[in-house]
Amino acid sequence: MTNYPNTNEAHTNQLSFDNTAIAFASKSTKELQLMKRAFTLMQSPWLVRNGTRFIDHTLHLKLVRGIVKNSLYKVFCGGETLQDCQSFIEKLYASKVHTMLGYSVESKTNDTEYDKTTAEIIRYIKFAAPQDALPFAAFKLSALASVHLLAKIHNGEKLSDTDQYAWHKVKDRVDSICAAGYEHHIKILIDAEESWIQDPIDELAQAMMAQYNQGRVVVYNTYQMYLQRGFTFLKNSLALAKQGNYLLGVKLVRGAYVVKEQQQAEKPRHTNLLNPDKATTDQMFDDAATFCLENIEHLALFAGTHNETSCYHIARLCQQMNIAPNNPRVFFGQLYGMSDHITYNLAKTGFNAVKYVPYGKVREVMPYLFRRAQENTAITGQSNRELELIKKELKRRKAAGI
């Protein structure tokens, strides 16, 4: 593999997540005040629980639509169209932060919508191709396939002729996206979802990696470390890749569906697939990251995490293993509007950092945003941390007369 020189001379001892001046350099004071209000809203248990239902019943009202679009939507989304997002892309890249735009609509229910979503993802890939700022595309399989069908396949149920035809079309959609990524040199992240539909996602991701990850990593599967099987599954996936003579694409996450997984585990005749506690998940994530860096000749790592300790861990290991911060096989990713103190400070010290920026119409994206809000309440201190960092920077600016 090519040895990428450390052209930025970035070292772990230069990396600090305490520097809010760097973290929020691209944000005006007005934008910070809007972020402060948004994270305060996200701490409302009522809004988090009932947000999607509230939006469904009131978004047709012009006043409500305006309030939503200029508050939560504005803080966490890039815009309604790809063109709306261009200014965000350029602003982020001016700070050496890459962008990954995501067509963030929740699960659809018919072929017309699945095909429309597929076409939009491919349109984004072509939009991203000439821009160095846009190295990745991502999608959820539930945006291209019936969740009911995915569950049947996961459970090993017999598929009818109609089901088999539908699954064939799903595979064609995924292949068309991965083929576009291969052709246009855009990396494709296949997101993980709930454990009860995950097997067909993993199987399809593995097939796409075997087909397209020859000589370079195009397709990434997502490995969830809050699952008991997480690290073992990752190691088995690398063994399969070596056996099949292809490279493994690893998007490493803790997991985005902890509340739903806990609720599922409480149902009769359901097994709890989650780790016993967060400490176990944290350790598994860091161990998996170490494993990936130790095997960097055979894989590429996209570390999707808002955890400071894990980011320090990966950065430190890169230095110890002489993996340059700008090595294209190692990326860090955080959600737009969150953990700017991690993203911007990583980028400042030469690491590859990406912001995931959702886009789409307000009515379609808001369920995604409220799911993120639910997850924030489930992660101890996450919303509080964001608020405290914003307050710290506002206080610093006031003291400096900025």
Image (tube, rainbow, N blue to C red):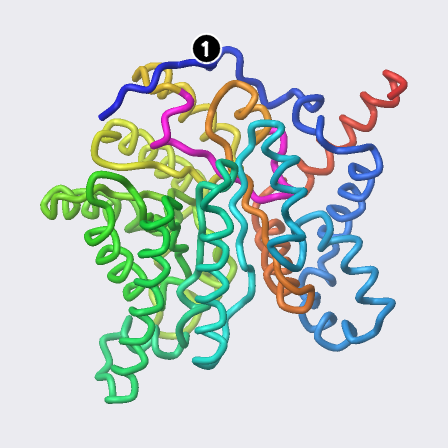
Q: Position of residue 294 (x, y in %)?
A: 25, 27
Q: Is residue 72 left or right of residue 135?
A: right
336 falls in the magenta region: yes
Q: Position of residue 241 (x, y in %)?
A: 17, 45
| Span colored in magenta | 325-341
Q: Quadrant of the N terminus?
A: top left
Q: Position of residue 225 (x, y in %)?
A: 37, 46
Residue shown at 64%/49% (left/top)?
A: 85
Q: Secondary structure at mark 1?
A: loop
Q: Quadrant of residue 49?
A: bottom right
Q: Is residue 15 left or right of residue 326?
A: right
Residue shown at 57%/18% (left/top)?
A: 16
Q: Residue furthest left?
A: 243
**Relative to residue 99, is residue 293 depicted above or below?**
above
Identify residue for label 1. Answer: 9
Q: Quadrant of residue 99?
A: top right
Residue 357 or 195: which is nearer the viewer?
357
Specify the amino acid type for callout 1.
Glu
Q: Is residue 41 left or right of residue 187?
A: right
Q: Quadrant of residue 261?
A: bottom left
Q: Quadrant of the C terminus?
A: top right
